[in-house]
């Protein structure tokens, strides 16, 4: 497959391939405290073999077992379409199984039908599923849960929901959810911001531009701040988790505590390190950037192989791991042509 038009422009020896995934598009990436690397694959792809793997010596190992990776069967006992992964501070792996209705994961209008969502908690000490949450009180027609972060202090899970343009908070004790800041300017896409790659706007055959509301999220290591932003917006926002946890606050009261921390870039995934840096994938210039605690935006690595860098995980080995989804190369957004540059690859780069 031909290389990107920008291939001769950007190259970095700092970028290290970790796993060759062939034609399997990975989305979710997360890393445990002892540097176990987990990667997930949504089932909305033509090429699909399994939902969740552990990468060992560059090879894919089905995780936690073959039963959970079955393609057919009881939806409550298998992964339907894994969207995101997160290893919490207690080394539990959280698997967000999210199959939204009508493509609403990107905030697009589609056929209105009920989506399917569950959150699976896996204890990495024994590789056993400990609990499954089914979001019984979530609006499954409108929702499109995208990313998850887990606050082990407050026993809460936080989700971006681009379908509802909202933050969803799940009480991990009761299983009840709350949908917050729905339609707030910080959770909504900027409709005037159209993504463009190599001089070509990212539009479908009808001319409608790609657009996503709140998408990437990050939780700081001290659990104090929850960072978030839409893909189609340059500003990065945060709110203290104590406010998200306060059930007495309505959206109007919550809105007073949303902080605009400044302009960044078009991003798809976020993650925080122990130093308080917020890493952001930046697809329009093929880079990974990071927002420092002092408010500076810096480039960690820039390379033309970073085609729609997506989900991020931080290893105890001092490396940042991430997937590249190549979404803008899909026929839907590429004038009907499949421009994917195989293989899909998991990369790593040294942290600053």
Image (cartoon, rainbow, N blue to C red):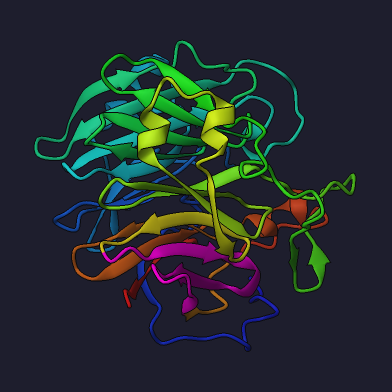
The residue lying toward the viewer, choosing from 288 and 346, is 288
Q: Residue furthest left?
A: 125
Q: Is residue 70 visible?
A: no
The N terminus, quarter of image: bottom right
Residue 293 percent across, percent down from the top left: 38, 67
Vertical comparison of 158 with 172: above or below: below
Residue 90 percent across, percent down from the top left: 16, 41
Q: Which segment is the magenta one?
A: 275-300
Q: Is residue 223 visible?
A: yes
Q: Residue furthest top?
A: 136
Where on the picture, by quarter, is residue 103?
Answer: top right
Which residue is pictured at 31% across the width and 38% down the height? 150
Vertical comparison of 123 with 281: above or below: above
Where on the picture, by quarter, is residue 70?
Answer: top left
Where on the picture, by quarter, is residue 213?
Answer: top right
Q: Residue furthest right?
A: 206
Magenta-span inclusion, residue 345: no
Total label count? 0
Describe residue 285's horizontal placement relative to residue 63 as left or right: right
Residue 259 percent across, percent down from the top left: 52, 50
Describe residue 344's horizontal placement relative to residue 202 as left or right: left
The C terminus, quarter of image: bottom left
Describe residue 88's horizontal placement relative to residue 334 as left or right: left
Which residue is pictured at 61% across the width and 65% down the height? 265
């Amino acid at each position: 497959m031909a290389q990107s038009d920008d291939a001769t422009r950007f190259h970095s020896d700092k970028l290290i391939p970790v796993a060759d995934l062939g034609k399997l598009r990975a989305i979710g990436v997360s890393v445990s405290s002892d540097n176990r690397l987990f990667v997930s694959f949504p089932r909305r792809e033509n090429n699909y073999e399994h939902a969740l793997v552990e990468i060992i010596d560059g090879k894919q190992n089905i995780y936690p077992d073959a039963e959970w990776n079955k393609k057919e069967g009881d939806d409550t006992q298998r992964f339907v379409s894994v969207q995101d992964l997160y290893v919490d501070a207690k080394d539990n792996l959280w698997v967000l199984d999210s199959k939204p209705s009508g493509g609403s994961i990107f905030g697009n209008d589609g056929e209105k039908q009920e989506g399917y969502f569950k959150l699976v908690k896996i204890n990495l000490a024994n590789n056993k599923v400990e609990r499954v949450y089914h979001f019984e009180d979530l609006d499954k027609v409108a929702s499109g849960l995208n990313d998850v972060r887990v606050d082990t202090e407050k026993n809460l899970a936080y989700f971006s929901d681009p379908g509802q343009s909202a933050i969803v908070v799940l009480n991990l004790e009761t299983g009840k959810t709350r949908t917050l800041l729905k339609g707030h300017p910080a959770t909504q896409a900027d409709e005037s911001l159209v993504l463009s790659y190599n001089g070509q706007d990212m539009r479908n055959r009808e001319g409608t531009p790609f657009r996503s509301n709140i998408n990437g999220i990050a939780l700081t290591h001290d659990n104090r701040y929850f960072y978030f932003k839409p893909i189609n917006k340059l500003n990065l926002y945060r709110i203290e988790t104590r406010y998200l946890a306060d059930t007495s606050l309505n959206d109007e009261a919550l809105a007073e505590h949303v902080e605009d921390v400044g302009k960044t870039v078009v991003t798809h995934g976020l993650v925080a390190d122990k130093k308080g840096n917020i890493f952001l994938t930046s697809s329009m210039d093929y880079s990974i950037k990071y927002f420092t605690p002092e408010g500076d935006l810096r480039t960690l690595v820039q390379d033309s192989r970073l085609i729609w860098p997506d989900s991020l995980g931080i290893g105890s080995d001092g490396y940042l791991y991430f997937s590249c989804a190549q979404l803008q190369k899909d026929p839907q957004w590429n004038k009907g042509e499949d421009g994917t540059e195989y293989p899909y690859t998991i990369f790593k780069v040294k942290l600053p």
